Image: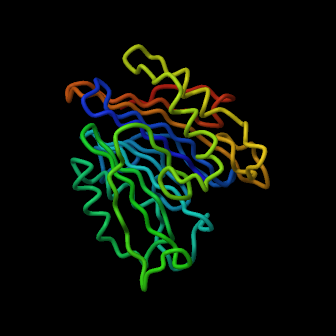
Amino acid sequence: MCTVIVMFRPGHAWPLILAANRDEMIARPWVPPARHWPDRPRVVAGRDELAGGTWLGLNDHGVVAAVLNRQGSLGPQAGMRSRGELPLEALNHADARSAAAALVHIEPRSYRSFNMAIADRDAAFWLRLKGDDESGLPAPAVEAFPIPAGLSMITSRDLNDPASDRIRLYLPRFERAAPPDPGAGDWASFQALLASRERAADGGAHGAMTLAPEQGYGTVSASLIALSARADTKPIWLFAPGPPGGVPFAPVAL
Protein backbone atom coordinates (compact mmCIF):
# COMPACT_ATOMS: atom_id res chain seq x y z
CA MET A 1 0.00 0.00 0.00
CA CYS A 2 1.72 3.16 -1.19
CA THR A 3 0.89 6.62 0.14
CA VAL A 4 0.71 10.02 -1.54
CA ILE A 5 0.24 13.25 0.43
CA VAL A 6 -0.80 16.29 -1.60
CA MET A 7 -0.56 19.80 -0.15
CA PHE A 8 -2.31 22.04 -2.70
CA ARG A 9 -2.15 25.77 -1.93
CA PRO A 10 -3.39 27.99 -4.78
CA GLY A 11 -1.84 31.45 -4.54
CA HIS A 12 1.11 30.29 -2.40
CA ALA A 13 4.73 30.72 -3.51
CA TRP A 14 4.93 26.90 -3.51
CA PRO A 15 1.39 25.88 -4.52
CA LEU A 16 2.07 22.15 -4.74
CA ILE A 17 3.99 19.94 -2.33
CA LEU A 18 3.75 16.18 -2.79
CA ALA A 19 5.17 13.57 -0.44
CA ALA A 20 5.11 9.85 -1.19
CA ASN A 21 6.20 6.49 0.19
CA ARG A 22 6.37 3.54 -2.18
CA ASP A 23 5.49 0.17 -0.64
CA GLU A 24 6.38 -2.76 -2.87
CA MET A 25 7.75 -6.29 -3.00
CA ILE A 26 11.38 -5.92 -1.94
CA ALA A 27 12.67 -8.14 -4.74
CA ARG A 28 10.95 -6.18 -7.54
CA PRO A 29 13.78 -4.40 -9.43
CA TRP A 30 13.72 -0.66 -10.05
CA VAL A 31 16.04 2.29 -10.61
CA PRO A 32 15.82 5.82 -9.11
CA PRO A 33 14.29 8.81 -10.91
CA ALA A 34 16.06 9.97 -14.07
CA ARG A 35 15.35 10.47 -17.79
CA HIS A 36 15.11 6.75 -18.53
CA TRP A 37 12.90 6.85 -21.65
CA PRO A 38 14.50 8.06 -24.93
CA ASP A 39 11.04 8.52 -26.42
CA ARG A 40 10.02 10.68 -23.44
CA PRO A 41 12.96 13.08 -23.00
CA ARG A 42 10.91 15.53 -20.91
CA VAL A 43 10.04 12.93 -18.22
CA VAL A 44 11.98 12.28 -15.01
CA ALA A 45 10.71 9.25 -13.10
CA GLY A 46 11.74 6.12 -11.29
CA ARG A 47 11.70 3.11 -13.59
CA ASP A 48 10.20 -0.27 -12.71
CA GLU A 49 12.55 -2.73 -14.35
CA LEU A 50 9.98 -5.53 -14.37
CA ALA A 51 7.33 -3.82 -16.52
CA GLY A 52 9.15 -0.70 -17.75
CA GLY A 53 6.77 1.87 -16.28
CA THR A 54 6.86 4.08 -13.21
CA TRP A 55 5.06 4.73 -9.94
CA LEU A 56 5.87 8.47 -9.76
CA GLY A 57 7.19 11.00 -12.27
CA LEU A 58 7.54 14.65 -13.18
CA ASN A 59 7.77 16.32 -16.59
CA ASP A 60 9.43 19.52 -17.73
CA HIS A 61 6.04 21.28 -17.86
CA GLY A 62 5.67 20.80 -14.09
CA VAL A 63 3.11 17.97 -14.13
CA VAL A 64 3.44 15.32 -11.40
CA ALA A 65 1.75 11.92 -11.71
CA ALA A 66 1.69 8.95 -9.34
CA VAL A 67 -0.15 5.62 -9.39
CA LEU A 68 -1.16 3.47 -6.41
CA ASN A 69 -2.79 0.05 -6.14
CA ARG A 70 -6.27 -0.20 -4.67
CA GLN A 71 -7.26 -2.80 -2.08
CA GLY A 72 -6.59 -6.39 -3.09
CA SER A 73 -4.78 -5.58 -6.33
CA LEU A 74 -1.08 -5.81 -5.50
CA GLY A 75 1.15 -6.93 -8.35
CA PRO A 76 0.68 -7.74 -12.03
CA GLN A 77 -2.02 -9.98 -13.46
CA ALA A 78 -1.77 -12.10 -16.59
CA GLY A 79 -3.55 -10.51 -19.53
CA MET A 80 -3.66 -7.04 -17.95
CA ARG A 81 -1.54 -4.02 -18.85
CA SER A 82 0.87 -2.58 -16.31
CA ARG A 83 -0.46 0.32 -14.26
CA GLY A 84 3.04 1.79 -14.48
CA GLU A 85 2.11 2.94 -17.99
CA LEU A 86 -0.43 5.39 -16.58
CA PRO A 87 1.87 8.03 -15.03
CA LEU A 88 3.88 8.01 -18.26
CA GLU A 89 0.70 8.64 -20.23
CA ALA A 90 -0.23 11.49 -17.88
CA LEU A 91 3.24 13.00 -18.27
CA ASN A 92 2.75 13.23 -22.04
CA HIS A 93 0.56 16.25 -21.28
CA ALA A 94 1.51 19.87 -20.61
CA ASP A 95 -0.90 20.41 -17.70
CA ALA A 96 -2.74 18.40 -15.07
CA ARG A 97 -6.22 19.18 -16.39
CA SER A 98 -5.57 17.74 -19.84
CA ALA A 99 -3.71 14.77 -18.34
CA ALA A 100 -6.63 13.90 -16.04
CA ALA A 101 -9.12 14.34 -18.88
CA ALA A 102 -7.13 11.95 -21.08
CA LEU A 103 -6.75 9.26 -18.41
CA VAL A 104 -10.51 9.12 -17.88
CA HIS A 105 -10.83 7.71 -21.39
CA ILE A 106 -8.44 4.77 -21.14
CA GLU A 107 -9.90 1.28 -21.56
CA PRO A 108 -10.61 0.35 -17.93
CA ARG A 109 -10.84 -3.40 -18.53
CA SER A 110 -7.16 -3.38 -19.51
CA TYR A 111 -5.93 -2.52 -15.99
CA ARG A 112 -6.24 -3.72 -12.45
CA SER A 113 -7.83 -1.23 -10.07
CA PHE A 114 -5.81 1.88 -9.16
CA ASN A 115 -5.70 5.34 -7.63
CA MET A 116 -3.76 8.18 -9.24
CA ALA A 117 -2.67 11.67 -8.27
CA ILE A 118 -2.08 14.13 -11.12
CA ALA A 119 -1.17 17.73 -10.28
CA ASP A 120 0.65 20.86 -11.34
CA ARG A 121 0.96 24.36 -9.87
CA ASP A 122 -2.61 25.24 -10.94
CA ALA A 123 -4.74 22.12 -10.33
CA ALA A 124 -4.72 18.73 -8.64
CA PHE A 125 -6.78 15.60 -9.32
CA TRP A 126 -7.45 12.19 -7.82
CA LEU A 127 -8.34 9.44 -10.29
CA ARG A 128 -9.93 6.16 -9.29
CA LEU A 129 -10.61 2.87 -11.04
CA LYS A 130 -12.46 0.59 -8.66
CA GLY A 131 -12.17 -3.17 -8.84
CA ASP A 132 -15.16 -5.14 -10.12
CA ASP A 133 -15.94 -6.30 -6.60
CA GLU A 134 -16.22 -2.74 -5.24
CA SER A 135 -17.50 -0.62 -8.13
CA GLY A 136 -21.24 -1.35 -8.01
CA LEU A 137 -21.26 -0.57 -11.73
CA PRO A 138 -22.06 -2.79 -14.73
CA ALA A 139 -18.50 -2.16 -15.93
CA PRO A 140 -15.56 -0.34 -14.34
CA ALA A 141 -14.93 3.27 -15.31
CA VAL A 142 -12.14 5.67 -14.47
CA GLU A 143 -13.38 8.62 -12.41
CA ALA A 144 -11.57 11.94 -11.83
CA PHE A 145 -12.15 14.29 -8.90
CA PRO A 146 -10.52 17.63 -8.07
CA ILE A 147 -8.29 17.50 -5.00
CA PRO A 148 -9.38 20.44 -2.83
CA ALA A 149 -7.06 23.11 -1.50
CA GLY A 150 -5.36 22.03 1.70
CA LEU A 151 -3.81 18.69 2.62
CA SER A 152 -5.05 15.34 1.34
CA MET A 153 -3.88 11.72 1.52
CA ILE A 154 -4.30 8.80 -0.85
CA THR A 155 -3.58 5.17 -0.02
CA SER A 156 -5.26 2.04 -1.42
CA ARG A 157 -8.65 3.45 -0.53
CA ASP A 158 -10.43 6.68 -1.44
CA LEU A 159 -9.04 10.17 -0.95
CA ASN A 160 -8.89 10.99 2.79
CA ASP A 161 -10.83 7.80 3.56
CA PRO A 162 -10.84 7.15 7.35
CA ALA A 163 -11.33 3.45 6.61
CA SER A 164 -7.60 3.44 5.89
CA ASP A 165 -5.66 2.88 9.12
CA ARG A 166 -2.82 5.00 7.76
CA ILE A 167 -5.04 7.92 6.79
CA ARG A 168 -6.93 7.83 10.07
CA LEU A 169 -3.71 8.11 12.07
CA TYR A 170 -1.50 10.26 9.85
CA LEU A 171 -3.75 12.71 8.02
CA PRO A 172 -4.28 14.78 11.21
CA ARG A 173 -0.54 14.63 11.90
CA PHE A 174 0.36 15.97 8.47
CA GLU A 175 -2.31 18.66 8.85
CA ARG A 176 -0.80 19.77 12.18
CA ALA A 177 2.81 19.61 11.01
CA ALA A 178 4.74 22.71 10.07
CA PRO A 179 4.56 22.94 6.26
CA PRO A 180 7.85 22.36 4.45
CA ASP A 181 9.73 25.44 3.26
CA PRO A 182 11.27 24.28 -0.03
CA GLY A 183 12.98 27.61 -0.68
CA ALA A 184 14.86 27.30 2.59
CA GLY A 185 15.47 23.58 2.19
CA ASP A 186 13.40 22.77 5.29
CA TRP A 187 11.55 19.46 4.90
CA ALA A 188 12.08 18.22 8.45
CA SER A 189 8.43 17.82 9.46
CA PHE A 190 7.38 15.78 6.43
CA GLN A 191 10.58 13.72 6.44
CA ALA A 192 9.93 12.71 10.03
CA LEU A 193 6.33 11.75 9.30
CA LEU A 194 7.23 9.74 6.19
CA ALA A 195 9.76 7.81 8.30
CA SER A 196 7.35 7.01 11.14
CA ARG A 197 6.76 3.35 11.92
CA GLU A 198 4.12 4.06 14.52
CA ARG A 199 0.70 2.56 13.97
CA ALA A 200 -2.55 2.83 15.86
CA ALA A 201 -3.17 0.22 18.54
CA ASP A 202 -6.41 -0.76 16.80
CA GLY A 203 -4.91 -0.59 13.29
CA GLY A 204 -3.67 -3.24 10.92
CA ALA A 205 -0.14 -4.22 9.99
CA HIS A 206 0.00 -1.61 7.21
CA GLY A 207 -1.02 1.35 9.36
CA ALA A 208 2.50 2.80 9.70
CA MET A 209 3.88 5.29 7.20
CA THR A 210 7.09 3.29 6.68
CA LEU A 211 6.69 -0.49 6.63
CA ALA A 212 9.53 -2.67 7.85
CA PRO A 213 10.21 -5.54 5.44
CA GLU A 214 7.83 -8.38 6.21
CA GLN A 215 7.30 -11.44 4.02
CA GLY A 216 9.26 -9.74 1.27
CA TYR A 217 7.16 -6.54 1.27
CA GLY A 218 7.87 -3.07 2.69
CA THR A 219 8.66 0.57 1.99
CA VAL A 220 11.30 0.74 -0.74
CA SER A 221 11.60 4.49 -1.45
CA ALA A 222 10.25 7.95 -0.63
CA SER A 223 9.89 11.27 -2.44
CA LEU A 224 9.33 14.93 -1.62
CA ILE A 225 8.40 17.21 -4.54
CA ALA A 226 7.68 20.95 -4.62
CA LEU A 227 6.44 23.09 -7.51
CA SER A 228 6.98 26.85 -7.46
CA ALA A 229 4.36 29.36 -8.56
CA ARG A 230 7.06 30.83 -10.79
CA ALA A 231 7.30 29.09 -14.14
CA ASP A 232 10.99 30.02 -14.34
CA THR A 233 11.82 28.24 -11.06
CA LYS A 234 12.70 24.56 -11.33
CA PRO A 235 10.77 22.05 -9.25
CA ILE A 236 12.49 20.38 -6.32
CA TRP A 237 12.53 16.61 -5.97
CA LEU A 238 14.19 14.91 -3.01
CA PHE A 239 14.41 11.12 -3.20
CA ALA A 240 15.31 8.43 -0.65
CA PRO A 241 16.26 5.14 -2.38
CA GLY A 242 15.14 3.09 0.59
CA PRO A 243 12.99 3.40 3.72
CA PRO A 244 12.96 7.05 4.87
CA GLY A 245 14.62 7.52 8.21
CA GLY A 246 17.17 4.84 7.42
CA VAL A 247 18.17 6.14 3.98
CA PRO A 248 18.76 9.89 3.46
CA PHE A 249 16.99 12.06 0.90
CA ALA A 250 19.06 13.57 -1.91
CA PRO A 251 18.12 15.92 -4.79
CA VAL A 252 17.07 14.39 -8.11
CA ALA A 253 18.75 15.94 -11.15
CA LEU A 254 16.05 17.74 -13.10
Question: Residue at the top extreme?
Answer: 184
Say left or right for 56 vs 244.
left
Above or below residue 66? Residue 10 is above
Residue furthest bottom in the image = 138
Above or below, 151 relative to 140: above
Residue visible at 28% across and 26% down in the picture: 12
Residue 203, image x, y percentages: 73, 50
Q: Residue at x 32, y 31 (%)?
A: 227
**Residue 210 rendering spot, x and y as whole percentages:** 67, 40
Applied colour scheme: rainbow
229 relative to 221, above or below: above
- Residue at 32% from the left image edge and 55% from the top image edge: 90
| Residue closer to the observer: 10 or 180 | 10
On screen, 12 above or below 48? above
- Viewer-nearest residue: 219 or 37: 219
Q: How many marks?
A: 0
The residue under the point 29% across, 41% down is: 120
